[in-house]
């Protein structure tokens, strides 16, 4: 077993990563903690059974597949590593998953033992045309690796506070916390992502969330197919990092409210 672990957010980054000469075991994080039910204690059995129920129902998946692709994969965190590299993007989807990973690491490991590094595409300006890690080749992955930042106790404490606020879902408390924190250390991308989430927590006069309203506007401006809506939404709202299956959750709500026909 290697002493190094790389945690990749999603399978899309795997092919580029596999082209690198980087040593270490790989754990693919396949959860979408930015959607669905959450509890503060991410290590509890009830946390993962609630996630499994929600994912299998929402994405028409079987519990066996969830067990294999998510739970079994997370078992790698039970091994002892001297170095852990977290490959996560700037968007809300990635940043909330990152908070979940940091929570697990905080609770599972003696934090003074492994060196934990964060690696993000935003650290490399020369790749500014790439939408995500999935678009990079092995050489570019290695460049990012060289620009990685080590996280310390400060970032872990900040992440724990952010996780608690995210799980509670109280817009006023989250806004207050975001305004009070002026220093973000090695996790500067957390703030814009959580500001985007704050917009999601509020509903407008029509009873729609920010994302529902954005999708309705896109639909009303002439995008009448799911694929056309996806493309327009990705273009306008990169910060959310939502895949088509997540956008579908919101489109289905609009359909139930009879505001769109697809």
Image (cartoon, rainbow, N blue to C red):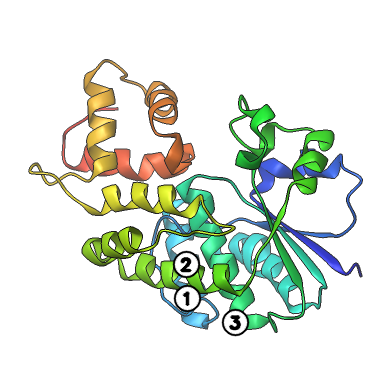
Which residue in the protein does label 3 denote? 107
Element marked by disc 2: helix
Which residue in the protein does label 2 denote? 51
* Of the two numbered discs 1 and 3 in the rendering, the one whose residue sits closer to the viewer: 3
* Marks 2 & 1, CB-CB < 8 Å contact: yes
Q: Position of residue 215 (x, y in %)?
A: 29, 32
Q: Position of residue 139 (x, y in %)?
A: 84, 35
Is tag 1's residue or tag 3's residue first in the polypeptide sequence?
Answer: 1
The numbered disc on residue 47 is 1
Residue at horizontal 53 percent and vertical 58 percent from the top: 97
**Is 138 on the left-hand or right-hand side of 128?**
right
Q: Is residue 180 at all visible to an observer of this figure?
A: yes
250 in relation to 197, above or below:
above
Residue at horizontal 17 percent and vertical 44 percent from the top: 208
Give the distance between the C-alpha atoms of the residues marked 2 and 1, in whole angstroms. Answer: 6 Å
Q: Quadrant of the N terminus?
A: bottom right
Give the distance between the C-alpha atoms of the residues marked 1 and 3, in whole angstroms. Answer: 14 Å
Within the image, what quadrant is residue 79 found in?
Answer: bottom right
* Marks 2 & 3, CB-CB < 8 Å contact: no
* Marks 1 & 3, CB-CB < 8 Å contact: no
Element marked by disc 3: helix
């Amino acid at each position: 077993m290697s002493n190094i672990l790389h945690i990749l957010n999603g399978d899309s980054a795997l092919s580029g990563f596999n082209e690198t000469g980087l040593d270490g075991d790989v754990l693919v994080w396949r959860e979408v903690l930015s959607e669905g039910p959450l509890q503060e204690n991410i290590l509890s059995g009830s946390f993962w059974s609630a996630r499994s129920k929600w994912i299998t129902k929402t994405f028409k998946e079987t519990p066996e597949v969830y067990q294999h692709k998510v739970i079994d994969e997370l078992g790698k965190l039970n091994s002892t590593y001297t170095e852990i590299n977290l490959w996560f993007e700037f968007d809300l989807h990635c940043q909330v998953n990152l908070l979940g990973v940091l929570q697990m690491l905080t609770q599972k490991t003696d934090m003074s033992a492994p060196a934990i590094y964060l690696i993000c595409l935003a650290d490399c300006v020369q790749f500014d045309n790439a939408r995500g890690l999935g678009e990079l080749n092995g050489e570019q992955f290695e460049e990012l690796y060289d620009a990685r930042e080590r996280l310390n106790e400060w970032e872990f404490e900040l992440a724990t506070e952010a996780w608690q606020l995210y799980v509670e879902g109280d817009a006023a408390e989250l806004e207050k916390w975001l305004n009070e924190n002026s220093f973000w250390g090695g996790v500067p991308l957390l703030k814009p992502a959580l500001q985007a989430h704050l917009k999601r927590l509020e509903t407008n006069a029509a009873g729609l969330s920010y994302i529902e309203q954005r999708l309705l506007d896109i639909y009303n401006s002439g995008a009448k197919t799911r694929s056309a809506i996806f493309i327009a939404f990705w273009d306008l709202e990169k910060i959310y990092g939502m895949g088509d299956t997540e956008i579908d959750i919101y489109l289905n709500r609009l359909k139930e409210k009879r505001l769109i026909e697809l």
